[in-house]
Image (tube, helix red, strand yellow):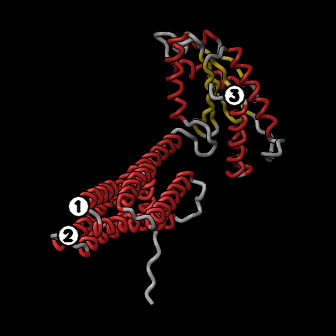
Amino acid sequence: MVSTPSSTPRDDAFLKTRIEAIYSIALAMIGMDLLGSAMMAGLFWQQGNNIWLPIWILASVIIIASRGVAAMAYKSGLFPNIPIRHWAASLVIFAGASGLLWGGALGLIVATGTDNQVMFAVCVALSGLTLSIAHVAYWPMYAAFELPVMIAAALGFFISDRPGHWPLAGAATVMTVVLLSVSRRLAGQVLHAHRLAAANQALVGSLGARGKALEQACDALERVSRTDPLTGLANRRQRDSRLADEWERGLRSGAPLAVVAIDVDHFKRFNDTHGHSEGDRCLKAVAEMLQAGLRGPIDLAARHGGEEFMLILPGVDRAGAASIAERVRVMVATCSNDAGFALPEKVTISLGVAAIHPAPGRSVHELTIAADAALYRAKMAGRNRYELAAVDSVAAAA
């Protein structure tokens, strides 16, 4: 026994797209079915089919109502666990039932009706087949409706006794084959269009995802290129860029700009005594304390080499910079007792504070040179302290 291959998620996705296209016009098609059924019922009534008329009308009402309920159930989304292939099968069943009803009525009218009745019934049936061509989005549904109608028409002409019934039966048979062939080809083109649309959508999604991934990679690379890998603080490149930006901003606004140059006291001895691993822990602890002592994203803490750090404080004067410098000095001096660090010995820092109002003809380098000079004085004065750069020393640096 040969088993049929199971459907793939991609096949189900294509099927769902086609089924949704059919359900999107379901109410309009049901209205067309009601109108056509009413016309066929009128022909039955004219022929005086007292037995078949109520049976046919009742069957039509049941099928049309069932189609309407199924369409509303699908569009409501209340039954997500029903496989899409079951919905597709229900469409084929309803289409086949409608085709049998229409075909039965058409065949009976063609076989026994007057020429005018036959012409009217054929026009109604062809109109129904023309409008239902929209169902080629899922070809089995169209075929299930078209085959019973056209076969019934051919049989009706075949058994009738009107003149030329043989050519008419042959013409109906040829039309059946032509409609099947044309609708099948059209359905293939619709499916191809769906596949192209899905492929294009997938390509757009892939390009979007790759573009986003590339953007994230570029952002990550940019962060890496501007971040010190050990401490996570800004590196020298970001420090220089931020200094230049804040200097330009100060030139426009007239606000002061302060920097604090920082050096870890006796770090070489610490590193030699306790090893590079503890030295790295020491630098990380200092970096964390510096970051914690800032005002948030307004300020910047940077490590620009070895045990050397710098704080950039936009809009801060000398007094404000001195207050921040003292705060971080105390935080670092007490961090060796913090349970999160537990450094092997007390760590201290020396700081040099300088502030300036950016002005034309001056340079940000004056500020950093003055801060370095104040840091040197703090180290010479015993370390674990900060020194302020005098106003005239900043000017003299020019």
* Foreground disc of the pair 3, 2: 2
Q: CA distance from mark 3 to mark 2?
A: 102 Å
Q: CA distance from mark 3 to mark 1?
A: 98 Å
**Which quadrant would residue 368 be assigned to in this image?**
top right
Q: CA distance from mark 2 to mark 1?
A: 9 Å
Q: Please name whichever residue, 185 or 250, is drawn nearer the observer in this view of the structure.
A: 185
Dot 3 or dot 2: first in sequence order is 2
Q: Are marks 2 and 1 in contact (CB under 8 Å)?
A: yes
Q: Position of residue 294 (x, y in %)?
A: 69, 28
Check disc 2: other Cα within 10 Å, few if <14, some if 14-19, many if 20+. some
Query: In the drawing, does residue 341 fall left or right of residue 376?
Result: right
Q: Residue at x 17, y 74 (%)?
A: 166
Question: Which residue carries the number 1 mark?
Answer: 115
Q: Residue at x 72, y 41 (%)?
A: 285
Dot 2 or dot 1: first in sequence order is 1
Q: Looking at the image, which residue sits at the far bottom?
A: 1
Q: Residue at x 35, y 67 (%)?
A: 103
Viewport quadrant of the N terminus? bottom left
Task: Please tell me whether residue 93 is drawn above or below residue 323 in the rendered image.
Answer: below
Question: Which residue carries the number 3 mark?
Answer: 294
Dot 3 or dot 1: first in sequence order is 1
